[in-house]
Image: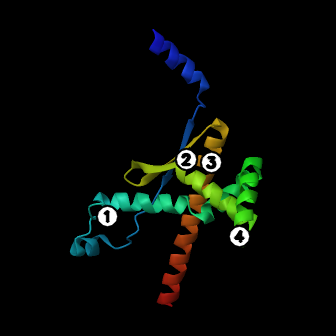
C-alpha cells in the first residue's frame, strides 16, 4: 500500500511528456533503371545493402537536428523568444564573447531538439519524426513543422539534382 501511495503521489510531481509525430515519405536515393539495377545487383525495393536503413535514419536525424533546420524551426515557431533560452544564451555569450547570442540560441535549441526528436521508419519509404515535449501543442507544432521543413528541403535538393543533371545533358 505504501509503494502504491508513493507511486501515485510521485506521478503528480512529474512533468508530463507529450509525444507527437509526423510521417514523411522519402524517395529512394538511387535513380537507375530496373535493368541496370538488376545488372549491378542493387535491389531498390528491399534496402540495397545491410544497414542501409539505419544509415538513412541516422542521416535523416542529423539533417533534422542540424542548425539549418533548427534555425528555420525557431523562426517559424518563435522558439528563440523563450526567456529561459535567451537568459541561458546571454550567460554563455559572456563566457564566449566571439559568438553571437542568436547563434548560441540556435545551438541551445539544436541540443534540445537532439534530445527531444526521434526518427524511425514508419514504412518502407516513410520516415516517422517523433517529438517529445511537456507542451502538447508545441510537440505537435514542432513535429509538423519539422516534417514541412524536411519536405521543402528535400524538394530543393531534388530540384538542384535535376538542374545539374540537365546542365550536364546540355
Side of 94 relative to 107 (left or right): right
Q: Which residue is mark 4?
A: 99
Q: Residues within 10 Å of mark 2 (few under 14, many from 20)?
A: some
The answer to which quarter of the image holds residue 37 is bottom left
Q: Secondary structure at mark 4?
A: loop
Of the two numbered discs 3 and 2 on the same chain, state the one appearing first in sequence. 2
Question: Marks 4 and 1: CB-CB under 8 Å?
Answer: no
Q: Residue at x 22, y 75 (%)?
A: 39
Residue farthest to the front? 95
Left or right of 49 in this view: 147 = right
**Which one is nearer the viewer's eye here, 50 or 94?**
94
Mark sitting earlier along the chain (2/4): 4
Q: Nearer the viewer, residue 126 or 86?
A: 86
Foreground disc of the pair 3, 2: 2
Q: Position of residue 18 (x, y in %)?
A: 57, 35
Q: Which residue is mark 3?
A: 142
Position of residue 107 relative to residue 170, above or below, is above
The reply to whether discs 3 and 2 touch (Cβ–Cβ < 8 Å) is yes
Give residue 44's mark.
Answer: 1
Residue that badge 2 annotates: 116
For numbered disc 1, what is the local secondary structure?
A: helix
- Callout 3: helix, strand or loop? helix
How far is disc 3 from disc 1 in space, using C-alphas?
A: 31 Å
Amino acid at each position: 500500500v505504501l509503494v502504491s501511495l508513493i507511486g501515485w503521489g510521485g506521478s503528480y510531481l512529474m512533468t508530463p511528456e507529450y509525444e507527437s509525430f509526423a510521417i514523411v515519405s522519402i524517395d529512394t536515393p538511387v535513380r537507375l533503371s530496373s535493368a541496370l539495377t538488376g545488372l549491378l545487383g542493387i535491389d531498390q525495393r528491399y534496402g540495397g545493402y545491410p544497414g542501409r536503413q539505419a544509415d538513412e535514419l541516422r542521416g535523416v536525424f542529423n539533417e533534422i537536428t542540424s542548425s539549418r533546420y533548427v534555425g528555420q524551426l525557431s523562426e517559424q515557431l518563435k522558439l528563440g523568444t523563450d526567456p529561459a533560452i535567451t537568459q541561458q544564451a546571454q550567460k554563455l555569450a559572456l563566457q564566449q564573447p566571439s559568438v553571437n547570442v542568436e547563434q548560441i540560441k540556435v545551438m541551445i535549441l539544436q541540443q534540445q531538439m537532439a534530445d527531444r526528436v526521434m526518427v524511425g521508419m514508419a514504412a518502407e519509404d516513410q520516415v516517422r519524426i517523433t517529438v517529445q515535449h511537456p507542451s502538447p501543442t508545441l510537440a505537435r507544432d514542432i513535429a509538423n513543422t519539422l516534417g514541412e521543413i524536411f519536405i521543402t528541403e528535400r524538394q530543393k535538393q531534388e530540384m538542384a539534382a535535376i538542374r545539374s543533371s540537365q546542365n550536364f545533358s546540355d
